[in-house]
């Protein structure tokens, strides 16, 4: 019995339903058609058969005719309308790689999907990229416009918060060095703390989602002490993402109670019940505040 080919419209609809082809349409509309990866095809009689890049081809076809995917037509049309007529016309023809045989095509597909030749950026490297953009003078709004498909705000906040923690004059040189080594102090652990308002209150800092800036609003003394304890607990492996799994988890609650006792003891030793004064923020400028 001869095997029947699946009709192309069914394949395209399946790619939108199960392979997130709509996200690719949105990316093409916002960033343009990126050509660092091209579809791979095989010569099949008088036609070219796509063996790698079907999602990309489906997205390009849908941009030309949104009604190929009836259940997503309105969303596709909204994104496609943002593409200029000239650009849409240029997307009618794309460059492909023609594999000499199925064997060579399979080798390439295996290399693409079972190995990763690119070295993925860690959280600190992601933050450093956007920190460099900010230091070069780009505003948050400019970055949001430049990178519409990237979690820019989160990365800029991460860079600002990291800069704040790195500004601490740690009593131990090993802690300072550990903070610059993502294998010893994972940014994801610090992130689960500085995003929590209760931790911000205890540490005397504010992390603004609107401005994407982290700054000290209490005394430097309090933040420096809390930061040293937290980084020390991470290096000492007392604190990890399992302990801070959820803000309402027992382990997270216990650690916050421990921090409360720590800050209370710190205030008693200093003879104050509140903090005030000025400090630095995550952009290197001064920040002022009263009782955190």
Image (tube, helix red, strand yellow):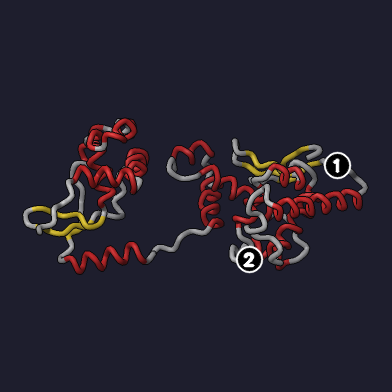
Looking at the image, the residue that sits furthest to the front is: 1
Q: Mark 1 or mark 2: name the one nearer the start of the chain.
A: 2
The residue lying at 46 percent from left, 45 percent from top is 150
Point out residue 249 in the picture as x, y percentages from the top left corner. 68, 51
Quadrant of residue 236 in the image? bottom right
Q: Is residue 102 above or below residue 286?
A: below
Residue 274's mark?
1
Q: Is residue 25 visible?
A: yes
Compared across the picture, whether 266 is left or right of 161 comes to: right
Q: Is residue 284 visible?
A: no
The residue to which callout 2 is attached is 184
Q: What secondary structure is marked by label 1?
A: loop
Q: Residues within 10 Å of mark 2 (few under 14, many from 20)?
A: some
Cα separation, mark 1 vs mark 2, equals 32 Å
Q: Residues within 10 Å of mark 1 (few under 14, many from 20)?
A: some
Q: Nearer the viewer, residue 259 or 33?
A: 259
**Element at label 2:** loop
Residue 49, position as x, y percentages in the image? 16, 55
**Displayed quadrant of residue 83:** top left
Horizontal relation, residue 187 to residue 144: left or right:
right
Name the residue located 73 percent from the left edge and 50 percent from the top edge: 253
Given the current orientation, which residue lies at the most extreme right position? 271
Query: In the picture shown, does residue 30 fall above or below 51?
Result: above
């Amino acid at each position: 019995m001869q095997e029947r080919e699946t009709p192309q419209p069914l394949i395209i609809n399946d790619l939108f339903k199960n392979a997130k082809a709509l996200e690719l349409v949105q990316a093409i509309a916002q960033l343009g058609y990126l050509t660092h990866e091209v579809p791979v095809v095989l010569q099949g009689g008088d036609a070219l058969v796509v063996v790698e890049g079907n999602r990309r081809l489906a997205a390009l076809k849908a941009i030309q005719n949104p009604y190929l995917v009836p259940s997503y037509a309105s969303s596709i049309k909204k994104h496609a309308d943002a593409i200029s007529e000239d650009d849409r016309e240029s997307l009618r023809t794309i460059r492909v790689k023609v594999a000499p045989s199925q064997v060579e095509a399979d080798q390439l597909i295996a290399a693409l999907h079972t190995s990763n030749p690119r070295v993925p950026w860690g959280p600190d490297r992601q933050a450093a990229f956007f920190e460099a953009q900010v230091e070069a003078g780009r505003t948050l709004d400019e970055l949001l416009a430049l990178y519409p498909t990237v979690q820019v705000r989160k990365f800029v906040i991460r860079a600002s918060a990291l800069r704040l923690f790195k500004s601490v004059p740690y009593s131990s040189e090993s802690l300072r060095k550990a903070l610059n080594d993502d294998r010893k102090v994972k940014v994801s652990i610090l992130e689960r703390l500085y995003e929590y308002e209760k931790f911000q209150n205890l540490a005397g800092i504010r992390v603004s989602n609107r401005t994407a800036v982290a700054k000290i609003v209490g005394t430097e003394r309090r933040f420096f002490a809390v930061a040293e304890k937290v980084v020390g607990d991470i290096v000492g492996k007392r604190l990890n993402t399992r302990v801070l799994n959820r803000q309402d988890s027992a382990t997270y609650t216990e650690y916050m109670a421990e921090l409360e006792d720590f800050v209370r003891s710190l205030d008693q030793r200093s003879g104050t019940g509140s903090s005030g004064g000025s400090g630095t923020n995550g952009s290197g400028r001064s920040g002022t505040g009263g009782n955190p």
